[in-house]
Amino acid sequence: MPIAAGQTLEDAILRSDTFQKWKTSFIDEADKDSNFSDEELINTFLDQVHLTSYDIKEVVNGKEIWDKDNPDLEDEDPQEMDGQPAERVLDKMADYSDLSLEELLERMEKVKDQQRTNHGGGSHWIGTGGISPYGHGGAAKDGLRVGGQGGGKMARKVMGDKNYFPIDRDALLNDDNVDAALASIKGVVEESAIERLDVPITIKAGLKRGGLFLPELTNDKFEELKVIVLLDNGGYSMAPYVRSVQQLFRKMKTRFAHDLETFYFHNTIYDRIWIDERRTTYITVEKLLTRNKDYRVFFIGDSAMAPYELTSMSIQSIQSITKKFKKSVWLNPEPLKYWPGTYTIQVMKELVPMFPLTPSGIERAVRKMNGKSTEG
């Protein structure tokens, strides 16, 4: 909906149908005991939809665009896009959430058959930088991202190759969706800045001042990432996921080339964790706690065990880890429907914020992780 004169962005968001639909879905997926303020909900909504990065001033009904569009439109005047496309200001977003995935896929196939060249900035073709329901780099909520990079985090599905295979973001981690999980987990990266003396600018500015040389500083930004993975590899129930988890974080390390340490445990953590998969060489939890507090910690396991295994020592160890490393989450491959019926899962999720081991769950875990305080 448009923002009226004198109306704040926050008020416009709260009044919009798009926000209300998102809010219903978000609260359904959140913990039942969670109590979110309007400010928290708006901030989370903006983080997910990235309206602020596009300066969106109006949300239009994608169904209305869809109904008026001609799927058989011919690409009569092909014009190849030479060089870089002109930068466009995206101040409008189309919401296609009222359309089914099947409708989108069927219409996209029709458009693809007619398309002969690259397009950008529109609402019909598979293109870039517009409000078309298929393409990339545009502003189409619940559309289909095809090719290229995202940016708005609005897409309902990501089409991987020329055959447009959909990726189920709610499926448990596997070989087919590990790249989607990687895209979700990369949000954990933080930018840091170091101030450096810019000698050329200092000299140039000093000469203009008639010889008064004052230090001119610049910020060199770099991505900083420190991750600890604590992986349960001790039982048959975790066996199907160990390799996929290792592949996910191996790709993460390759992509970002920063500190990544992986340790292993069985069911829960007592006074030690193992360095190797066979669990023959270990370090103590006490030694783990000497690491820099800025590490992000991912516990990964199904948390399903006999109640007697979850001893006071185990609880104290996990509490000491989450106390030292404020940004800690637990990723669980056990289907959500079984969580309420497993006592040890209920205990563990009280100790560590717990999310499903799916691309969607990982994305929510990263948002939770980035929202936690690092003081202390």
Image: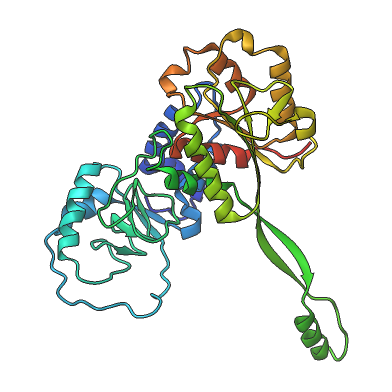
What x and y, as percent, mark residue 286?
79, 29
What x and y, as percent, mark residue 310?
64, 13
> Which residue is painted at 21% across and 55% down in the image?
108
Q: Quadrant of residue 231?
A: top right
Question: Which residue occupies the extreme right position in the image?
Answer: 212
Residue 189 in the figure: left or right of residue 317:
left
Q: How is the image coloured?
A: rainbow
From where the camera sits, is residue 103 visible? yes
Quadrant containing the C terminus in the rendered view: top right
Q: Nearer the viewer, residue 1 or 199?
A: 199
- The number of numbered discs placed on residues in the rendered structure image is 0
Please determine whether, in this image, residue 329 is positioned above or below residue 348. Answer: below
From where the camera sits, is residue 186 visible? no
Q: Quadrant of residue 329?
A: top right
> Which residue is painted at 43% across and 57% down in the image?
56
What x and y, as percent, mark residue 246?
53, 40
Residue 156 in the figure: left or right of residue 247:
left
What x and y, as percent, mark residue 51?
46, 53
Residue 192 in the figure: left or right of residue 234:
right
> Which residue is painted at 52% across and 21% down in the image?
235
Residue 33 in the figure: left or right of residue 105:
right
